[in-house]
Amino acid sequence: MPNPFSDFLQFLQKSTLHGRFPIYAFIFLVLASVAIALFNFARNPEQRTMQKTYTWLARLFVGGMWYQQMLWKMPLTFTDSPDGSGGLRYWMGEMGKYAAFKQHAALVNDLMLPHFKVFALQVWAGETFIAVSLMLGLFTRLGGLLGTLMAINLWLGLYNRPNEWPWTYFFLILLNGFFLFLRAGRALGIDALVAPKITSGGTLRRIISWIT
């Protein structure tokens, strides 16, 4: 029977429709996250706390989840099925049927599905950015914000779908909200290296200060 550890090993050994490159990229992101965390740990005593370590692990795992979910909706087909079936188009269709509010369903059916590739590319790019942002601790408040908005869309869009547990998406909202409001990238991430170098003044500096 499968278990979390065997499933993870199978994931590392799988090939996607784009070959092995996406899996190699995932392994690189994990190793880079560990290296960044160790660098922060070694150079800054304030980073050597259980709270910082737990925050790093939380965003690493949640970022990994976003990365894994991104893999089955990659362009140009936006599905991982060799025959092109299922994938993101299918789940958008489910939102059009089961959204909690009719306005949400109408937005999916009347705008998003007729222009599927435009919106599908945005979904894929958004999830990729969230994954990289959380795993590396780079511009993590922005990654947390996008993750929260994505999770809200899933929560409301699939709220009435049979065999779905809406609390799953609600907990995902809470998790990504923590990364947004707690500045999780400043815990053993790249943001922890960037933030101290930002001084007040200038629109660009204020934007970078906010998203880190």
Image (tube, rainbow, N blue to C red):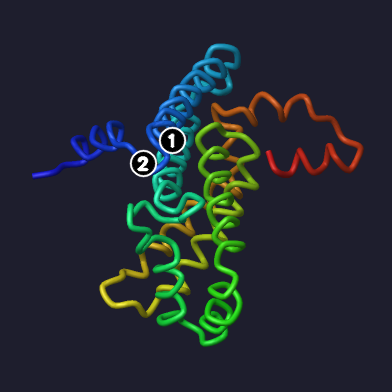
Mark 2: which amino acid? Thr
Rendering coords of residue 69 (x, y %): 41, 50
| Residue projecting furthest to the top | 42
| Residue projecting furthest to the bottom | 102
Answer left or right for 135 relative to 210: left
Query: How crowded is the residue under tag 2: few (<14 C-alpha within 10 Å), some, or many (20+)?
Result: some
Who's the residue at 58% across and 79% down the image? 107
Residues tagged 1 and 2 counted as in contact (Cβ below 8 A): yes
Q: Secondary structure at mark 2?
A: loop
Residue 154, compared with residue 179, is above or below; it is below
Quadrant, the N terminus: top left
Answer left or right for 122 relative to 78: right
Answer with mark 1 or mark 2, whichever residue precedes in sequence.
2
Residue 80, compared with residue 198, is above or below; it is below
Answer left or right for 209 relative to 47: right
Labelled disc at residue 48: none
Q: Secondary structure at mark 1?
A: helix
Rendering coords of residue 207 (x, y %): 79, 43
Who's the residue at 46% across and 81% down the image? 100
What residue is shown with label 1?
Answer: 22
Q: Quadrant of residue 120?
A: bottom right
What residue is shown with label 2?
Answer: 16
